[in-house]
Amino acid sequence: LSTDTDVSLSSCPFVPIGMAGFAAIVAYGLHTLKSRGNTKMSLHLIHMHVAAQGCVVGAMTVVMGYSMYQEFWAKPKPLMKRCCLGLAGGACFS
């Protein structure tokens, strides 16, 4: 793997945003734990787990999409020269 395209925590703000979203969802889930009504404890915890995991996976998806955009679409394409070897002297055209 090349190290020039690696995404680090300092260069990408989406990972801390995903972690903060995870913490916020867990805090909200724990806050609403007492007022869950007739919902079973296990179902409440599953909903909290799925929401928190969805936040992290969503942030990772955004990071990968952003990284792919930078890698493949945002880079200026180098100007390629076409060489015609059939001509005398191998003339190249830009």
Image (spheres, rainbow, N blue to C red):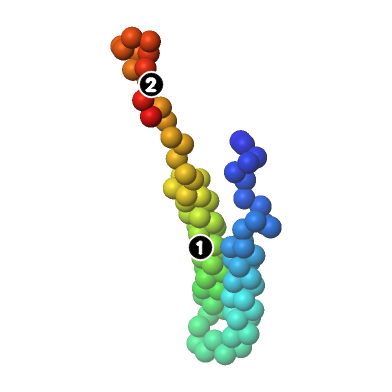
**Quadrant of residue 3 within the rendered picture:** top right
Where 23 falls versus 74 (above or below)?
A: below
Q: Position of residue 76 (x, y in %)?
A: 47, 44
Closer to the N terminus: mark 1 or mark 2?
A: 1
Left or right: 73, with 53 as reference point? left
Q: Which mark is residue 58?
A: 1
**Quadrant of residue 13 within the rendered picture:** bottom right
Query: Would residue 55 be seen by someone viewing this image from the given angle?
Result: yes
Q: Amino acid at mark 2?
A: Cys
Where 80 falls versus 31 (above or below)?
A: above
Q: Secondary structure beneath disc 1?
A: helix
> Which residue is pictured at 66% across the width and 52% down the height?
8
Q: Which mark is residue 29?
A: none
Q: How many neighbours does mark 1 have within 10 angstroms: few (below 14), some (14-19), or many (20 or more)?
A: some
Q: CA distance from mark 1 to mark 2?
A: 48 Å
Where 87 falls versus 29 (above or below)?
A: above
Residue at the left extreme, as displayed: 86
Left or right: 23, with 48 as reference point? right
Label count reads 2
Left or right: 33, with 10 as reference point? left
Q: Label 2: which residue? A: 92
Query: Would residue 49 be seen by someone viewing this image from the given angle?
Result: no
